Amino acid sequence: MFVFAKEDQFMIILAILGITIGLLHVLAHNLWVKDWRIIITLFGWFSLMKGISQFAFPGIATKWIDNIDFKWFQFLLFLLFLVGLVLLNQAYGWVLY
């Protein structure tokens, strides 16, 4: 994935995908409330801003990918997985506490 990410064409495709997902997310779930649902809203806005910045500055995003340490990337993916599990539990109430 890191090899493909260094190409500008792949970066533009990811930017368009990020803009599309972020825009759909912001249009469907733009709730600014003081509970756990704001995390979902912030993820949508972050995706939209990330896609716009990748589309506008693909060279800077490519340089940023060169500086990523793979161990920290795996740790970040694990944290996002845990946040996803917590949000799924909040939404569907699988584990009652």
Image (cartoon, rainbow, N blue to C red):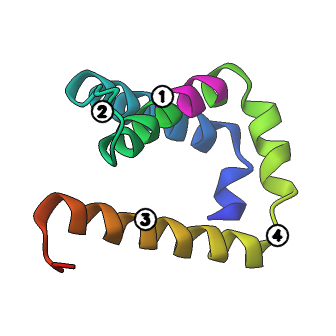
Crowd class of label 4 (few under 14; some 14 to 19; many from 20; radius 10 Å): few
Above or below, 40 relative to 52: below
Residue 27 rendering spot, x and y as whole percentages = 26, 21
What amino acid is at disc 2?
A: His
Label 1 environment density (alpha carbons within 10 Å; few <14, some 14–19, many ≥20): many
Query: Residue 48: which numbered mark, if any?
Result: 1
Q: Which residue is mark 2?
A: 25
| Residue 1 image point, x, y percent | 61, 65
Q: Which badge, 4 or 2, is on the more N-terminal residue? A: 2
Q: Are marks 1 and 2 in contact (CB under 8 Å)?
A: yes
**Mark positioned earlier in the residue sequence (1 or 4):** 1
Using the numbered discs, state the Cα–Cα distance from disc 4 to disc 3 in whole angstroms. 21 Å
Point out which mark residue 83 bears.
3
Disc number at residue 69?
A: 4
Nearer the observer: mark 2 or 3; the answer is 3
Q: What's under tag 1, amino acid-wise?
A: Leu
